Amino acid sequence: MFKKTYILFGIAFLLQTVVFGQTNKDMLHIQGGSYIPLYGRDSVLVKVNDFFMDKLPVTNQQYVDFVKQYPEWQKSKVKRLFADEMYLINWKNDTILNHTERLESPITYVSWFAASKYCECQGKRLPTVDEWEYVAMADEELADARVKKTYNEKILSWYEAPRTNTYEVGRNPENFWGVKDLHGLVWEWTSDFNSILITGESRKDVDKDTNLFCGSAAVGATDLMNYAAFMRYAFRGSITARYNIKNLGFRCVQDMPIE
């Protein structure tokens, strides 16, 4: 009985390793830790667990492969509940891009619903805001480069003149974790992109009022000089899950396996 159990355990472990290796291709291990986000939940450290993140944003080529395998997400077939009329508007048809688009550029004009489904079909998921911000606060040398004046200046210069979706992925330098293009290419969806909108001066407030976003953000912010992060949070608060935007793409993450 013990021998049989041991063999079954070994087979299960082998299968998990094979599947895990397939789903983690081109992903990087992000060592968890704690950080104080811009809207710091009363300046409390937020814990981020270890996870894997895609090194690069999802490309047009990868999304073409996805819609071929899952035709319900093709532009002529997607339900308007999940994507507005701008969905894949830069594509010639259901599986071919316009001639001005590049296959190795980041996919854009995709809704939160579409991005979530893509990640789910890869055995992955969209990153949380905290996971994304935790990795994005790194530069090439430091895991948390927010104290450096040049860090915010560099990001803001891109926000003023974004490079849009016409550039190929992977051109920007790797950050501390080895991840590329979190800044300098396109904005990216997160799983809880509008979670920060629960606001108000009292903890007893239960209503969401998106009109309060800008004012309450300034009150609750932990770093009033972090204009780059202000812009990200403001952008997230201005969109809905059905929107498909020219400069908005995504990448996937994956939880660490349970040992």
Image (tube, rainbow, N blue to C red):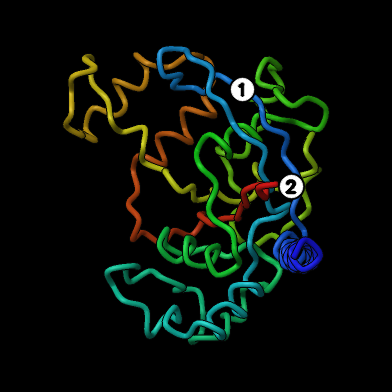
Mark 1 is on which residue type?
A: Ser
Q: Residue at point 68% right, 31% down? A: 154
Asked whether the viewer can see residue 224, the reply is no
209 lies left or right of 243:
left
Q: Quadrant of residue 221?
A: top left
User: Could you say which is closer to the camera, residue 258 or residue 185?
Assistant: 258
76 to 214, vertically: above or below: below
Asked whether the viewer can see residue 211, the reply is yes
Say whether marks 2 and 1 touch (CB < 8 Å).
Answer: no
Mark 2 is on which residue type?
A: Lys
Q: Position of residue 189 (x, y in %)?
A: 49, 50
Nearest to the eye among marks 2 and 1: give it. Answer: 1
Q: Residue at point 47% right, 66% down? A: 117
Mark 2 lies on residue: 180
Distance, label 2 to label 1, CA atoms, is 21 Å
Number of marks in the rendered image:
2
94 lies left or right of 64:
left
Task: Assess disc 1: are there few (<14), some (14-19) or many (≥20) residues with their C-alpha within 10 Å of its C-alpha.
Answer: few
Quadrant where the image shows the N terminus: bottom right
Residue 34 is marked as 1
252 to 50, vertically: above or below: below
Q: Where is residue 157 in the image (x, y as percent from the top left)?
A: 63, 34
Q: Residue at point 49% right, 22% down? A: 38
Residue 107 is marked as none
Q: Position of residue 33 (x, y in %)?
A: 66, 26
